[in-house]
Amino acid sequence: MENRYRVLGIAPYEGMKTLMSGLAEEYPEIDLTLFVGDLEEGLEIAHSNFHGNYDAVISRGGTAKMLRKNLPLPVVEIPVSMYDLLCSLKLAGASARAGKVSMVAFDNITANARLLCDLLDYDIDIRTVDDGPEAEAILAGMQQDCCEAILCDAVSNAAAKRLGFNSFLITSGPDSIRQAFEQALFLCRSQTHLREENLFFRELLHGQIGQTIVLDDNGHLYLSTLEHPSQGLLDLLKRELPESRKEEERRIIRNLDGMLYSIRSRRVTSGSLSRTAFFFAARKSPLSPNQTGIRFSTRPEAEAAFYSSIFSFAGTIRDFQDDIDRISRSSAPVMVTGEDGTGKESIVSVLYLRGALQNNPLVSVNCSLLNEKSWDFLLENHHSPLADEDITIYFSSIDALSPERRQQLLAALSEMDVCRRNRVLFSCVCQPGEYTSAAGSLFMDKLCCLSLFLPPLRQLSDRIPALVNLSLSHLNADLPRQLVGAEPEALALLQSFRWPHNYTQFRRVMGELAVTAAGQVITAQDVRDILRKERHMGAFSPTAENASAPLDLSRPLAEITQDVARRVLEENGGNQTAASRQLGISRTTLWRLLQK
Protein backbone atom coordinates (compact mmCIF):
# COMPACT_ATOMS: atom_id res chain seq x y z
CA MET A 1 0.00 0.00 0.00
CA GLU A 2 1.38 3.38 -1.01
CA ASN A 3 0.15 5.52 1.92
CA ARG A 4 0.82 4.06 5.34
CA TYR A 5 0.47 6.03 8.53
CA ARG A 6 3.29 5.77 11.04
CA VAL A 7 1.83 5.29 14.52
CA LEU A 8 3.81 5.14 17.78
CA GLY A 9 2.21 2.81 20.34
CA ILE A 10 3.19 3.19 24.02
CA ALA A 11 1.63 0.38 26.06
CA PRO A 12 1.57 0.59 29.88
CA TYR A 13 2.26 -3.15 30.22
CA GLU A 14 3.91 -5.88 28.15
CA GLY A 15 0.71 -7.84 27.48
CA MET A 16 -0.95 -4.85 25.80
CA LYS A 17 2.06 -4.49 23.52
CA THR A 18 1.65 -8.12 22.43
CA LEU A 19 -2.09 -7.70 21.86
CA MET A 20 -1.62 -4.44 19.91
CA SER A 21 1.01 -6.08 17.73
CA GLY A 22 -1.36 -8.91 16.81
CA LEU A 23 -4.37 -6.68 16.15
CA ALA A 24 -2.32 -4.25 14.02
CA GLU A 25 -2.30 -6.88 11.27
CA GLU A 26 -6.00 -6.09 10.75
CA TYR A 27 -5.07 -2.51 9.76
CA PRO A 28 -2.69 -2.56 6.77
CA GLU A 29 -2.75 1.25 6.58
CA ILE A 30 -0.99 1.48 9.95
CA ASP A 31 2.79 1.11 10.30
CA LEU A 32 2.97 0.52 14.05
CA THR A 33 6.05 0.86 16.29
CA LEU A 34 5.50 -0.41 19.83
CA PHE A 35 7.17 0.24 23.19
CA VAL A 36 6.26 -0.41 26.83
CA GLY A 37 6.35 2.52 29.26
CA ASP A 38 4.26 4.37 31.84
CA LEU A 39 3.86 8.11 32.60
CA GLU A 40 7.32 9.79 32.58
CA GLU A 41 8.87 6.67 31.06
CA GLY A 42 6.28 6.76 28.26
CA LEU A 43 6.93 10.46 27.66
CA GLU A 44 10.68 9.78 27.53
CA ILE A 45 10.06 7.06 24.92
CA ALA A 46 7.99 9.48 22.85
CA HIS A 47 10.72 12.16 22.99
CA SER A 48 13.41 9.59 22.17
CA ASN A 49 11.49 8.42 19.09
CA PHE A 50 10.29 11.79 17.86
CA HIS A 51 12.69 11.53 14.91
CA GLY A 52 10.56 8.66 13.58
CA ASN A 53 8.15 11.01 11.74
CA TYR A 54 5.02 9.62 13.37
CA ASP A 55 1.53 10.70 12.43
CA ALA A 56 -0.12 9.76 15.74
CA VAL A 57 0.49 8.19 19.13
CA ILE A 58 -1.65 5.51 20.82
CA SER A 59 -1.47 4.98 24.60
CA ARG A 60 -3.70 4.46 27.64
CA GLY A 61 -4.77 6.20 30.83
CA GLY A 62 -2.48 8.65 32.61
CA THR A 63 0.30 8.08 30.06
CA ALA A 64 -2.00 9.18 27.22
CA LYS A 65 -3.03 12.26 29.21
CA MET A 66 0.62 13.20 29.83
CA LEU A 67 1.54 12.68 26.17
CA ARG A 68 -1.28 14.99 25.05
CA LYS A 69 0.16 17.79 27.17
CA ASN A 70 3.72 17.40 25.91
CA LEU A 71 3.55 16.30 22.26
CA PRO A 72 2.47 18.21 19.13
CA LEU A 73 1.06 14.98 17.65
CA PRO A 74 -2.50 13.69 18.06
CA VAL A 75 -2.67 11.19 20.93
CA VAL A 76 -5.36 8.48 20.88
CA GLU A 77 -6.34 6.94 24.20
CA ILE A 78 -7.12 3.21 24.45
CA PRO A 79 -10.33 2.97 26.49
CA VAL A 80 -11.18 0.60 29.31
CA SER A 81 -14.62 -0.66 28.38
CA MET A 82 -17.40 -1.72 30.70
CA TYR A 83 -16.73 -5.34 29.65
CA ASP A 84 -13.03 -4.96 30.52
CA LEU A 85 -13.99 -3.65 33.96
CA LEU A 86 -16.56 -6.39 34.49
CA CYS A 87 -14.00 -9.15 33.80
CA SER A 88 -11.52 -7.59 36.23
CA LEU A 89 -14.21 -7.15 38.91
CA LYS A 90 -15.22 -10.79 38.48
CA LEU A 91 -11.65 -12.03 39.01
CA ALA A 92 -11.00 -9.78 42.00
CA GLY A 93 -14.32 -10.65 43.60
CA ALA A 94 -13.71 -14.38 43.20
CA SER A 95 -10.27 -14.03 44.76
CA ALA A 96 -11.37 -11.87 47.69
CA ARG A 97 -14.61 -13.83 48.29
CA ALA A 98 -16.13 -12.06 51.30
CA GLY A 99 -13.14 -9.83 51.86
CA LYS A 100 -12.73 -6.16 50.98
CA VAL A 101 -12.08 -5.14 47.36
CA SER A 102 -10.69 -1.72 46.43
CA MET A 103 -9.73 0.11 43.26
CA VAL A 104 -6.93 2.65 42.75
CA ALA A 105 -6.64 4.10 39.24
CA PHE A 106 -6.71 7.20 37.03
CA ASP A 107 -10.04 8.91 36.36
CA ASN A 108 -10.42 7.39 32.88
CA ILE A 109 -11.02 4.06 34.66
CA THR A 110 -12.63 5.06 37.96
CA ALA A 111 -15.41 7.14 36.31
CA ASN A 112 -16.81 4.12 34.43
CA ALA A 113 -16.10 1.85 37.39
CA ARG A 114 -18.35 3.95 39.65
CA LEU A 115 -21.18 3.78 37.10
CA LEU A 116 -20.80 0.01 36.78
CA CYS A 117 -20.65 -0.57 40.55
CA ASP A 118 -23.77 1.56 41.06
CA LEU A 119 -25.58 -0.40 38.35
CA LEU A 120 -24.60 -3.82 39.75
CA ASP A 121 -24.76 -2.77 43.42
CA TYR A 122 -21.09 -3.64 44.06
CA ASP A 123 -19.59 -2.29 47.27
CA ILE A 124 -16.04 -1.29 46.23
CA ASP A 125 -13.79 1.43 47.64
CA ILE A 126 -12.78 3.40 44.50
CA ARG A 127 -9.97 5.99 44.69
CA THR A 128 -8.81 8.23 41.85
CA VAL A 129 -5.18 9.30 41.43
CA ASP A 130 -3.46 11.81 39.17
CA ASP A 131 0.13 10.53 39.19
CA GLY A 132 2.44 7.72 40.34
CA PRO A 133 3.55 9.23 43.69
CA GLU A 134 -0.07 9.86 44.67
CA ALA A 135 -0.92 6.22 43.85
CA GLU A 136 1.95 4.99 46.04
CA ALA A 137 0.89 7.26 48.91
CA ILE A 138 -2.75 6.14 48.77
CA LEU A 139 -1.79 2.47 48.64
CA ALA A 140 0.64 2.88 51.53
CA GLY A 141 -2.19 4.35 53.58
CA MET A 142 -4.38 1.35 52.75
CA GLN A 143 -1.97 -1.25 54.16
CA GLN A 144 -3.88 -1.35 57.45
CA ASP A 145 -7.31 -1.66 55.74
CA CYS A 146 -7.07 -5.47 55.33
CA CYS A 147 -7.83 -5.38 51.60
CA GLU A 148 -8.07 -8.86 50.06
CA ALA A 149 -7.78 -7.55 46.50
CA ILE A 150 -6.97 -4.25 44.79
CA LEU A 151 -7.89 -3.43 41.20
CA CYS A 152 -5.26 -1.20 39.60
CA ASP A 153 -4.19 0.43 36.38
CA ALA A 154 -0.57 -0.10 35.29
CA VAL A 155 0.84 2.72 37.46
CA SER A 156 -0.99 1.71 40.63
CA ASN A 157 -0.29 -1.97 39.95
CA ALA A 158 3.48 -1.39 40.02
CA ALA A 159 3.15 0.45 43.35
CA ALA A 160 0.87 -2.29 44.74
CA LYS A 161 3.45 -4.95 43.89
CA ARG A 162 6.19 -3.02 45.68
CA LEU A 163 3.97 -2.82 48.77
CA GLY A 164 3.02 -6.52 48.69
CA PHE A 165 -0.71 -6.24 47.85
CA ASN A 166 -2.74 -8.85 45.97
CA SER A 167 -3.25 -6.61 42.93
CA PHE A 168 -5.30 -7.21 39.77
CA LEU A 169 -4.26 -5.28 36.65
CA ILE A 170 -7.24 -3.81 34.80
CA THR A 171 -6.58 -4.73 31.18
CA SER A 172 -8.02 -3.42 27.92
CA GLY A 173 -9.42 -6.14 25.69
CA PRO A 174 -9.18 -6.56 21.90
CA ASP A 175 -12.33 -4.52 21.15
CA SER A 176 -11.00 -1.54 23.12
CA ILE A 177 -7.71 -1.63 21.21
CA ARG A 178 -9.53 -1.92 17.87
CA GLN A 179 -11.53 1.17 18.82
CA ALA A 180 -8.27 3.08 19.37
CA PHE A 181 -6.87 1.93 16.01
CA GLU A 182 -10.03 3.11 14.25
CA GLN A 183 -9.79 6.53 15.88
CA ALA A 184 -6.08 6.78 14.99
CA LEU A 185 -6.87 6.01 11.35
CA PHE A 186 -9.59 8.67 11.33
CA LEU A 187 -7.17 11.30 12.72
CA CYS A 188 -4.35 10.30 10.36
CA ARG A 189 -6.62 10.49 7.33
CA SER A 190 -7.78 13.97 8.34
CA GLN A 191 -4.29 15.49 8.52
CA THR A 192 -0.81 14.98 7.10
CA HIS A 193 2.54 15.76 8.68
CA LEU A 194 5.25 16.65 6.20
CA ARG A 195 8.84 16.47 7.46
CA GLU A 196 10.91 16.57 4.24
CA GLU A 197 13.68 18.65 5.79
CA ASN A 198 14.17 16.15 8.64
CA LEU A 199 14.21 13.23 6.20
CA PHE A 200 16.68 15.06 3.93
CA PHE A 201 19.19 15.61 6.73
CA ARG A 202 18.84 12.04 8.01
CA GLU A 203 19.64 10.72 4.54
CA LEU A 204 22.56 13.15 4.28
CA LEU A 205 24.03 11.98 7.61
CA HIS A 206 23.65 8.33 6.60
CA GLY A 207 26.27 8.95 3.93
CA GLN A 208 29.04 9.66 6.40
CA ILE A 209 31.37 7.15 8.08
CA GLY A 210 30.15 6.08 11.53
CA GLN A 211 26.91 7.12 13.24
CA THR A 212 25.46 10.35 14.60
CA ILE A 213 23.18 11.08 17.54
CA VAL A 214 22.08 14.63 18.43
CA LEU A 215 20.69 15.50 21.89
CA ASP A 216 19.02 18.70 23.06
CA ASP A 217 20.09 20.41 26.28
CA ASN A 218 17.63 18.31 28.30
CA GLY A 219 19.11 15.05 27.02
CA HIS A 220 16.18 14.27 24.71
CA LEU A 221 16.96 12.62 21.39
CA TYR A 222 16.72 15.19 18.58
CA LEU A 223 18.21 13.27 15.66
CA SER A 224 19.71 9.83 15.08
CA THR A 225 21.10 7.90 12.13
CA LEU A 226 20.42 4.69 14.06
CA GLU A 227 16.91 3.32 13.52
CA HIS A 228 16.55 2.26 17.17
CA PRO A 229 19.43 3.47 19.37
CA SER A 230 19.75 1.38 22.52
CA GLN A 231 18.77 2.88 25.86
CA GLY A 232 22.23 2.02 27.19
CA LEU A 233 23.91 4.07 24.47
CA LEU A 234 21.54 7.01 25.01
CA ASP A 235 22.19 6.91 28.76
CA LEU A 236 25.95 6.88 28.12
CA LEU A 237 25.73 9.97 25.88
CA LYS A 238 23.47 11.76 28.37
CA ARG A 239 26.13 11.30 31.05
CA GLU A 240 28.66 12.93 28.71
CA LEU A 241 26.33 15.82 27.83
CA PRO A 242 27.25 18.26 30.66
CA GLU A 243 30.99 18.17 29.83
CA SER A 244 30.37 18.19 26.07
CA ARG A 245 28.26 21.35 26.36
CA LYS A 246 31.23 23.18 27.90
CA GLU A 247 33.60 22.48 25.01
CA GLU A 248 33.25 23.12 21.29
CA GLU A 249 34.69 19.72 20.46
CA ARG A 250 35.65 16.74 22.61
CA ARG A 251 36.96 13.20 22.02
CA ILE A 252 36.23 10.33 24.39
CA ILE A 253 36.40 6.52 24.49
CA ARG A 254 33.87 4.48 26.40
CA ASN A 255 33.19 0.74 26.92
CA LEU A 256 29.56 -0.47 26.81
CA ASP A 257 28.18 -4.01 26.63
CA GLY A 258 31.39 -5.46 25.25
CA MET A 259 31.73 -2.72 22.59
CA LEU A 260 34.35 0.04 22.51
CA TYR A 261 32.92 3.41 21.40
CA SER A 262 35.17 6.09 19.93
CA ILE A 263 33.14 9.30 20.28
CA ARG A 264 33.61 12.87 19.08
CA SER A 265 31.19 15.42 20.50
CA ARG A 266 30.60 18.83 18.92
CA ARG A 267 28.41 21.74 19.97
CA VAL A 268 26.32 22.93 16.98
CA THR A 269 24.56 26.32 17.08
CA SER A 270 22.41 27.92 14.37
CA GLY A 271 20.49 31.06 15.33
CA SER A 272 18.52 30.30 18.49
CA LEU A 273 18.88 26.56 17.99
CA SER A 274 21.70 24.86 19.89
CA ARG A 275 22.33 21.12 20.12
CA THR A 276 25.13 18.66 20.97
CA ALA A 277 26.10 16.16 18.26
CA PHE A 278 27.90 12.91 18.97
CA PHE A 279 29.74 11.26 16.07
CA PHE A 280 30.92 7.77 16.92
CA ALA A 281 32.13 4.40 15.68
CA ALA A 282 31.94 1.13 17.62
CA ARG A 283 34.02 -2.01 17.55
CA LYS A 284 34.14 -5.14 19.70
CA SER A 285 36.01 -4.55 22.92
CA PRO A 286 39.24 -6.55 23.24
CA LEU A 287 38.26 -7.49 26.82
CA SER A 288 34.69 -8.10 27.88
CA PRO A 289 33.86 -8.75 31.57
CA ASN A 290 30.72 -10.67 30.62
CA GLN A 291 32.11 -14.21 31.01
CA THR A 292 30.07 -17.40 31.00
CA GLY A 293 27.96 -17.63 34.15
CA ILE A 294 28.64 -14.02 35.21
CA ARG A 295 25.94 -11.44 34.47
CA PHE A 296 25.94 -7.69 35.18
CA SER A 297 22.55 -6.05 35.84
CA THR A 298 21.36 -2.52 36.55
CA ARG A 299 18.53 -1.56 38.87
CA PRO A 300 15.93 -1.28 36.02
CA GLU A 301 16.96 -4.73 34.75
CA ALA A 302 16.61 -6.23 38.23
CA GLU A 303 13.18 -4.61 38.61
CA ALA A 304 12.10 -5.97 35.22
CA ALA A 305 13.27 -9.47 36.19
CA PHE A 306 11.33 -9.34 39.47
CA TYR A 307 8.12 -7.93 37.98
CA SER A 308 8.10 -10.69 35.35
CA SER A 309 8.16 -13.35 38.09
CA ILE A 310 5.14 -14.85 39.86
CA PHE A 311 6.27 -13.32 43.17
CA SER A 312 5.63 -9.79 41.94
CA PHE A 313 1.88 -10.30 41.75
CA ALA A 314 1.25 -13.19 44.13
CA GLY A 315 1.76 -11.17 47.31
CA THR A 316 4.18 -13.82 48.61
CA ILE A 317 6.86 -11.23 49.33
CA ARG A 318 4.60 -9.86 52.08
CA ASP A 319 5.38 -12.99 54.15
CA PHE A 320 9.02 -11.99 54.31
CA GLN A 321 8.64 -8.25 54.88
CA ASP A 322 10.02 -8.35 58.42
CA ASP A 323 12.94 -10.59 57.41
CA ILE A 324 13.73 -8.43 54.38
CA ASP A 325 13.62 -5.24 56.48
CA ARG A 326 15.89 -6.84 59.09
CA ILE A 327 18.36 -8.08 56.49
CA SER A 328 18.34 -4.77 54.60
CA ARG A 329 19.50 -2.94 57.71
CA SER A 330 22.58 -5.18 57.92
CA SER A 331 25.64 -5.40 55.68
CA ALA A 332 26.32 -9.05 56.58
CA PRO A 333 26.32 -11.74 53.86
CA VAL A 334 22.98 -13.48 53.28
CA MET A 335 22.19 -17.11 52.45
CA VAL A 336 18.79 -17.73 50.80
CA THR A 337 17.74 -21.38 51.07
CA GLY A 338 14.82 -23.39 49.79
CA GLU A 339 13.79 -26.20 47.50
CA ASP A 340 13.98 -25.95 43.72
CA GLY A 341 11.60 -23.29 42.36
CA THR A 342 10.78 -21.51 45.63
CA GLY A 343 11.78 -18.08 44.30
CA LYS A 344 15.33 -17.54 45.50
CA GLU A 345 16.18 -15.34 42.49
CA SER A 346 13.14 -13.13 43.15
CA ILE A 347 13.96 -12.71 46.85
CA VAL A 348 17.54 -11.78 45.94
CA SER A 349 16.19 -9.14 43.52
CA VAL A 350 14.09 -7.64 46.33
CA LEU A 351 17.06 -7.64 48.73
CA TYR A 352 19.13 -5.85 46.09
CA LEU A 353 16.41 -3.32 45.23
CA ARG A 354 15.84 -2.47 48.91
CA GLY A 355 19.50 -2.37 49.80
CA ALA A 356 21.73 0.67 50.12
CA LEU A 357 23.60 -0.27 46.89
CA GLN A 358 20.52 -0.44 44.64
CA ASN A 359 21.89 2.26 42.30
CA ASN A 360 25.11 0.30 41.77
CA PRO A 361 25.42 -2.86 39.66
CA LEU A 362 24.14 -6.30 40.64
CA VAL A 363 26.58 -9.04 39.59
CA SER A 364 25.03 -12.51 39.42
CA VAL A 365 27.40 -15.49 39.41
CA ASN A 366 25.64 -18.73 38.43
CA CYS A 367 27.92 -21.39 39.88
CA SER A 368 26.37 -24.13 37.73
CA LEU A 369 27.46 -22.33 34.53
CA LEU A 370 31.04 -21.40 35.41
CA ASN A 371 33.62 -22.95 33.11
CA GLU A 372 37.40 -22.95 33.58
CA LYS A 373 37.79 -19.61 31.79
CA SER A 374 35.14 -17.81 33.80
CA TRP A 375 36.35 -19.40 37.06
CA ASP A 376 39.88 -18.11 36.38
CA PHE A 377 38.44 -14.69 35.49
CA LEU A 378 36.50 -14.61 38.76
CA LEU A 379 39.48 -15.45 40.97
CA GLU A 380 42.45 -13.99 39.11
CA ASN A 381 41.47 -11.17 36.73
CA HIS A 382 41.78 -7.57 37.97
CA HIS A 383 38.39 -6.85 36.30
CA SER A 384 36.72 -9.53 38.44
CA PRO A 385 33.68 -8.36 40.46
CA LEU A 386 35.51 -9.69 43.54
CA ALA A 387 38.01 -6.85 43.09
CA ASP A 388 35.25 -4.21 42.87
CA GLU A 389 33.59 -2.36 45.73
CA ASP A 390 30.16 -0.98 46.65
CA ILE A 391 28.32 -3.47 44.44
CA THR A 392 25.99 -6.40 45.14
CA ILE A 393 27.36 -9.85 44.26
CA TYR A 394 25.00 -12.82 44.13
CA PHE A 395 26.33 -16.40 43.99
CA SER A 396 23.51 -18.76 42.97
CA SER A 397 23.52 -22.56 43.14
CA ILE A 398 26.67 -22.83 45.24
CA ASP A 399 25.80 -26.54 45.57
CA ALA A 400 26.99 -26.92 41.96
CA LEU A 401 30.57 -26.06 42.93
CA SER A 402 32.94 -28.94 43.54
CA PRO A 403 34.30 -29.20 47.12
CA GLU A 404 37.65 -27.87 45.87
CA ARG A 405 36.06 -24.81 44.26
CA ARG A 406 33.97 -24.11 47.35
CA GLN A 407 37.14 -23.87 49.41
CA GLN A 408 38.82 -21.69 46.77
CA LEU A 409 35.86 -19.29 46.69
CA LEU A 410 35.70 -19.08 50.48
CA ALA A 411 39.42 -18.33 50.61
CA ALA A 412 39.09 -15.60 47.94
CA LEU A 413 36.13 -13.97 49.70
CA SER A 414 37.98 -13.92 53.02
CA GLU A 415 41.46 -12.93 51.80
CA MET A 416 40.15 -10.18 49.49
CA ASP A 417 37.74 -8.87 52.16
CA VAL A 418 34.95 -9.02 49.57
CA CYS A 419 32.07 -9.12 52.07
CA ARG A 420 33.21 -5.92 53.78
CA ARG A 421 33.57 -3.94 50.53
CA ASN A 422 30.35 -5.22 48.91
CA ARG A 423 26.95 -6.73 49.66
CA VAL A 424 27.29 -10.49 49.10
CA LEU A 425 24.31 -12.82 48.67
CA PHE A 426 24.22 -16.60 48.21
CA SER A 427 21.58 -19.20 47.45
CA CYS A 428 21.55 -22.98 47.73
CA VAL A 429 19.03 -25.69 46.94
CA CYS A 430 17.92 -27.87 49.84
CA GLN A 431 16.07 -31.15 49.62
CA PRO A 432 12.60 -31.80 51.14
CA GLY A 433 12.81 -31.67 54.93
CA GLU A 434 16.10 -29.69 54.92
CA TYR A 435 16.63 -26.10 56.00
CA THR A 436 19.85 -25.82 54.03
CA SER A 437 22.29 -27.97 52.08
CA ALA A 438 25.79 -29.07 53.11
CA ALA A 439 27.32 -26.41 50.86
CA GLY A 440 24.97 -23.79 52.28
CA SER A 441 25.92 -24.68 55.86
CA LEU A 442 29.61 -24.45 54.99
CA PHE A 443 29.29 -20.88 53.65
CA MET A 444 26.95 -19.81 56.46
CA ASP A 445 29.40 -21.00 59.12
CA LYS A 446 32.56 -19.64 57.48
CA LEU A 447 31.15 -16.20 56.56
CA CYS A 448 28.62 -15.72 59.42
CA CYS A 449 25.74 -15.32 56.98
CA LEU A 450 22.23 -14.21 57.81
CA SER A 451 19.74 -16.75 56.48
CA LEU A 452 16.32 -16.66 54.83
CA PHE A 453 14.39 -19.91 54.24
CA LEU A 454 11.68 -20.04 51.55
CA PRO A 455 9.01 -22.68 52.31
CA PRO A 456 7.76 -25.01 49.56
CA LEU A 457 4.41 -24.39 47.90
CA ARG A 458 2.89 -27.61 49.26
CA GLN A 459 3.02 -26.07 52.76
CA LEU A 460 0.92 -23.13 51.52
CA SER A 461 -1.82 -25.05 49.71
CA ASP A 462 -4.53 -22.86 51.27
CA ARG A 463 -3.25 -19.98 49.15
CA ILE A 464 -3.55 -21.78 45.83
CA PRO A 465 -7.12 -20.56 45.04
CA ALA A 466 -5.96 -16.94 45.40
CA LEU A 467 -2.78 -17.70 43.44
CA VAL A 468 -4.87 -19.18 40.63
CA ASN A 469 -6.97 -16.01 40.28
CA LEU A 470 -3.93 -13.74 40.55
CA SER A 471 -2.14 -15.80 37.89
CA LEU A 472 -5.15 -15.64 35.58
CA SER A 473 -5.35 -11.87 36.06
CA HIS A 474 -1.68 -11.63 35.06
CA LEU A 475 -2.07 -14.03 32.12
CA ASN A 476 -5.18 -12.28 30.79
CA ALA A 477 -2.97 -9.40 29.66
CA ASP A 478 -1.47 -11.76 27.03
CA LEU A 479 -4.54 -13.79 26.08
CA PRO A 480 -7.00 -13.07 23.23
CA ARG A 481 -9.86 -14.03 25.61
CA GLN A 482 -10.21 -13.40 29.31
CA LEU A 483 -10.43 -16.22 31.88
CA VAL A 484 -12.58 -15.57 34.94
CA GLY A 485 -11.65 -18.40 37.33
CA ALA A 486 -11.57 -22.16 37.97
CA GLU A 487 -14.12 -24.74 39.11
CA PRO A 488 -14.03 -25.68 42.82
CA GLU A 489 -13.00 -29.24 41.95
CA ALA A 490 -10.20 -27.89 39.74
CA LEU A 491 -8.93 -25.79 42.67
CA ALA A 492 -9.07 -28.82 44.97
CA LEU A 493 -6.96 -30.83 42.52
CA LEU A 494 -4.36 -28.06 42.36
CA GLN A 495 -4.30 -27.83 46.16
CA SER A 496 -3.71 -31.57 46.59
CA PHE A 497 -0.82 -31.69 44.10
CA ARG A 498 2.67 -31.92 45.67
CA TRP A 499 4.37 -29.33 43.38
CA PRO A 500 7.92 -30.79 43.47
CA HIS A 501 9.27 -27.75 41.61
CA ASN A 502 7.11 -25.27 43.54
CA TYR A 503 6.27 -21.84 42.11
CA THR A 504 8.27 -22.36 38.92
CA GLN A 505 6.17 -25.41 38.14
CA PHE A 506 2.93 -23.72 39.29
CA ARG A 507 3.40 -20.77 36.96
CA ARG A 508 4.17 -23.04 34.00
CA VAL A 509 1.10 -25.19 34.73
CA MET A 510 -1.14 -22.10 34.99
CA GLY A 511 0.26 -20.83 31.69
CA GLU A 512 -0.57 -24.13 30.00
CA LEU A 513 -4.05 -24.24 31.56
CA ALA A 514 -4.76 -20.71 30.35
CA VAL A 515 -3.89 -21.71 26.78
CA THR A 516 -5.57 -25.14 26.69
CA ALA A 517 -8.80 -24.38 28.60
CA ALA A 518 -11.76 -24.49 26.21
CA GLY A 519 -13.94 -21.95 28.01
CA GLN A 520 -13.53 -18.94 30.27
CA VAL A 521 -13.46 -21.16 33.38
CA ILE A 522 -10.77 -23.80 34.01
CA THR A 523 -12.43 -27.18 34.57
CA ALA A 524 -11.41 -30.14 36.74
CA GLN A 525 -10.77 -32.18 33.59
CA ASP A 526 -8.41 -29.47 32.30
CA VAL A 527 -6.41 -29.78 35.53
CA ARG A 528 -6.40 -33.60 35.48
CA ASP A 529 -5.00 -33.63 31.93
CA ILE A 530 -2.16 -31.26 32.86
CA LEU A 531 -1.25 -32.81 36.23
CA ARG A 532 -1.12 -36.28 34.70
CA LYS A 533 1.84 -35.11 32.61
CA GLU A 534 3.37 -33.21 35.54
CA ARG A 535 3.56 -36.32 37.69
CA HIS A 536 5.58 -38.02 34.98
CA MET A 537 7.85 -35.01 34.51
CA GLY A 538 8.35 -34.58 38.26
CA ALA A 539 9.64 -38.12 38.49
CA PHE A 540 12.11 -38.00 35.64
CA SER A 541 13.07 -34.40 34.81
CA PRO A 542 16.21 -33.02 36.46
CA THR A 543 16.31 -29.31 37.19
CA ALA A 544 19.10 -26.94 36.37
CA GLU A 545 19.12 -25.65 39.93
CA ASN A 546 19.74 -29.13 41.33
CA ALA A 547 22.23 -30.17 38.65
CA SER A 548 25.80 -30.87 39.68
CA ALA A 549 28.74 -29.12 38.13
CA PRO A 550 30.18 -30.98 35.11
CA LEU A 551 33.12 -33.30 35.81
CA ASP A 552 36.51 -31.78 35.12
CA LEU A 553 38.07 -34.46 32.90
CA SER A 554 41.44 -32.71 32.75
CA ARG A 555 42.37 -34.06 36.21
CA PRO A 556 44.08 -37.37 37.02
CA LEU A 557 41.88 -40.48 36.88
CA ALA A 558 42.16 -41.03 40.65
CA GLU A 559 40.67 -37.57 41.36
CA ILE A 560 37.84 -38.08 38.84
CA THR A 561 37.01 -41.48 40.39
CA GLN A 562 36.96 -39.97 43.89
CA ASP A 563 34.68 -37.13 42.69
CA VAL A 564 32.22 -39.64 41.18
CA ALA A 565 32.19 -41.65 44.44
CA ARG A 566 31.45 -38.52 46.50
CA ARG A 567 28.60 -37.47 44.22
CA VAL A 568 26.95 -40.90 44.29
CA LEU A 569 27.27 -40.96 48.09
CA GLU A 570 25.59 -37.52 48.31
CA GLU A 571 22.76 -38.68 45.98
CA ASN A 572 22.15 -41.60 48.35
CA GLY A 573 21.95 -39.36 51.41
CA GLY A 574 25.26 -40.58 52.86
CA ASN A 575 24.20 -44.26 52.79
CA GLN A 576 27.44 -46.10 51.96
CA THR A 577 25.72 -49.45 51.36
CA ALA A 578 23.35 -47.95 48.76
CA ALA A 579 26.18 -45.93 47.17
CA SER A 580 28.52 -48.95 46.88
CA ARG A 581 25.67 -51.04 45.41
CA GLN A 582 25.00 -48.33 42.78
CA LEU A 583 28.72 -48.13 41.90
CA GLY A 584 29.11 -51.91 41.78
CA ILE A 585 31.92 -51.97 44.34
CA SER A 586 32.31 -53.09 47.95
CA ARG A 587 31.88 -50.74 50.92
CA THR A 588 35.59 -51.20 51.69
CA THR A 589 36.56 -50.07 48.18
CA LEU A 590 34.23 -47.09 48.47
CA TRP A 591 35.77 -46.15 51.84
CA ARG A 592 39.28 -46.29 50.33
CA LEU A 593 38.23 -44.08 47.39
CA LEU A 594 36.85 -41.46 49.76
CA GLN A 595 39.97 -41.47 51.95
CA LYS A 596 42.47 -40.79 49.11
Image (cartoon, rainbow, N blue to C red):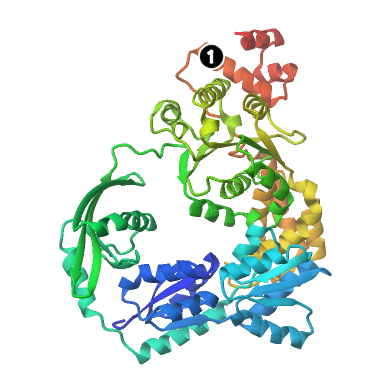
What amino acid type should be assigned to the residue bearing mark 1?
Answer: Glu
- Residue at (77, 47) in percent of width and height: 458
Height in image: 137 above or below 580? below
Q: Nearer the viewer, residue 443 or 291?
A: 443
Residue 126 at least partly seen: yes
Name the residue furthest front.
246
Q: Which residue is mark 1?
A: 559
Give the x, y percent position of residue 252.
24, 48
Q: Residue at point 23% right, 54% down? A: 280
Out of 21 and 74, give the one closest to the viewer.
Answer: 74
Q: Is residue 250 left or right of residue 163?
A: left
Residue 466 in the image: state x and y as whole percent: 75, 61
The tally of labels here is 1
Whether 588 is drawn above or below 414: the answer is: above
**Measured along the vertical axis of the image, is residue 119 above or below residue 246?**
below
Horizontal relation, residue 148 to residue 424: left or right: right
Q: Position of residue 551 (x, y in %)?
A: 52, 24
Residue sitting nearer the eye, 268 or 25: 268
Residue at x-position 47% and y-position 86%: 182
Which residue occupies 46% across, 87% down?
A: 183
The crowd level at tag 1 (other Cα within 10 Å; few <14, some 14-19, many 20+) is some
